[in-house]
Amino acid sequence: MKTNLHPTEYRPVVFSDDVAGFAFLTQSTAQTTDTIAWEDGNEYPLVKIHISSASHPFFTGEEKIIDTEGRVDRYKAKFAAAEARKAALASKAKKANAAKAKKAAAQE
């Protein structure tokens, strides 16, 4: 086995889920520059997380969308734009077919 592979400098770190208002203190090697005053009066490094067991649908039994980067909105906008293009092309094809039919009727 390789030696010195695993980290050895574990320290107390607070992980905080701001969405759910949930935080917990544990040992970690995660690096951060933020700090927080904990319930015991000591100050610990703070790691902010987007989702935890307090806000994850699997643990809460609720289904809610946590979209911190706007991916859902971008998807909905892209889907709406595709539908608009599809409708515009259908309208254009309908007008072209009507013009063809009118021209054919005029030639007979």
Image (cartoon, rainbow, N blue to C red):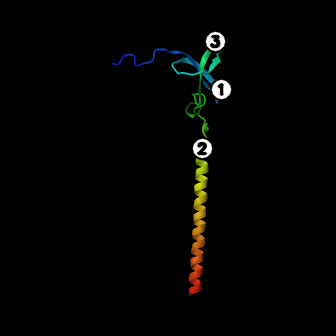
Instruction: Return the mark for residue 72.
Output: 2
Look at the numbered disc 1 and give the secondary structure of its residue: loop
Q: Which residue is mark 1?
A: 21
Q: Disc 2 residue type?
A: Val
Quarter the C terminus occupies: bottom right
Look at the numbered disc 2 and give the secondary structure of its residue: helix
**Label 1: few (<14), some or many (≥20) within 10 Å?**
few
From what the image shows, is residue 93 above or below residue 73?
below
| Marks 3/1: CA–CA distance | 19 Å
From what the image shows, is residue 55 above or below residue 36?
below
The first of marks 3 and 1 along the sequence is 1
| Marks 1/2: CA–CA distance | 23 Å
Q: Which residue is mark 3?
A: 42
Look at the numbered disc 3 and give the secondary structure of its residue: loop
Q: Disc 3 residue type?
A: Asn
Q: Residue at x 58, y 42 (%)?
A: 71
